[in-house]
Image (cartoon, grey):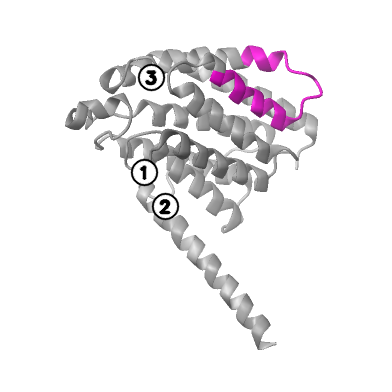
Amino acid sequence: MADRETQRAAVIAAVERVADRMTAEKTYLTELDSAIGDADHGANMARGFEAVREKIADADADADPGDLVKTVGVTLISEVGGASGPLYGGSIMSASTELADGITAESSVAFAEAYLAKVKDRGGAELGAKTMVDALTPAVHTYKKSIETDDLPPLEALAKAVDAAERGVNYTVPLRAQKGRASYLGWRSVGHQDPGATSTLFIMEELLATAEEYLDGDVDLEQDATSPTSPDDAEESAAEGDDDDTADDDTADDDTGGD
């Protein structure tokens, strides 16, 4: 586990990277949102993360890494309009409590799971609705499995999660939208990439770049043939993992009973 000052520096560096990326991709995200939405996603995300960059720069020097992540959420709520602010910001703010004792492999898994749960709860979207959930779900499940089952280092686990998120973004293209303004288009939404899933991938790519810098590593982002090929596969894999855990628990109970 990196020390507190290194974790603080990493959070600030991640914010800088994400803000730069959102500004660079503003036009592209707007183009995606123009096809099936209200054409404001790029501008909203760029404005929101520029505000986060300024807020973090003024943050209390004694603020813990978890407090800084909470500040990211609070700022996005206040600066990003429409549904995106509460969805992104509120979910980050809520999940930040999982980082209260620092950023570790275990707490980062808890944060990712809490963030996904809050996004689904606040947005009311499930897999296949053509939303950011289609990128987040395989990413979170892959990250959790890589850490807890495959015992991979966090950097390699995050790289696999980014790969899974990219597959999730591609998965949205042939889907018919079921949530938000895009759902008004019905079948005309088919063939378009979801902007929310895309910005989620961009954020994750910048988190990986930050992790490579602070964990002093470099990973290959070539697609992993063993990772899920769609968000549905990821959810099924996660369910099978839960079943395995239950089976292990049952075995443990049997052993105790045998004694």
Nearer the N terminus, badge 2 or badge 1?
1
Residue picked out by circle 2: 235
Dividing the image into 4 quarters, which one contains the N terminus?
Answer: top right
Amino acid type, label 3: Leu
Is residue 67 left or right of 3 when viewed as pictured? left
Residue 127 badge: 1
* Above or below, comparing residue 110 to residue 10 in the picture: below
Marks 2 and 3 sit apart, C-alpha to C-alpha, by 27 Å
- Residue 108: horizontal and vertical position, in percent? 63, 42
Q: Is residue 229 visible?
A: no
Secondary structure of the magenta portion, mostly? Answer: helix
- Residue 187 part of the magenta segment: no
Q: Are marks 1 and 3 in contact (CB under 8 Å)?
A: no
Residue at coordinates 27% horizontally, 23% vertically from top-left? 36
- In the rendered image, the residue lying farthest to the right is 62
Q: Is residue 67 visible?
A: yes
Using the numbered discs, state the Cα–Cα distance from disc 1 to disc 3 in whole angstroms.
Answer: 21 Å
Q: Which residues are magenta?
A: 53-77
In the rendered structure, which disc, 2 or 3, sits on the residue that comes first in sequence? 3
**Foreground residue among 76 and 240:** 76
Mark 3: few, some, or many residues within 10 Å (few <14, many ≥20)?
many
Q: Quadrant of the C terminus?
A: bottom right
The tag on residue 29 is: 3
Q: For the residue carrying disc 2, how many other residues have a C-alpha within 10 Å: few (<14), some (14-19), or many (20+)?
A: some
Q: From the viewer's perspective, is 174 left or right of 150?
A: left
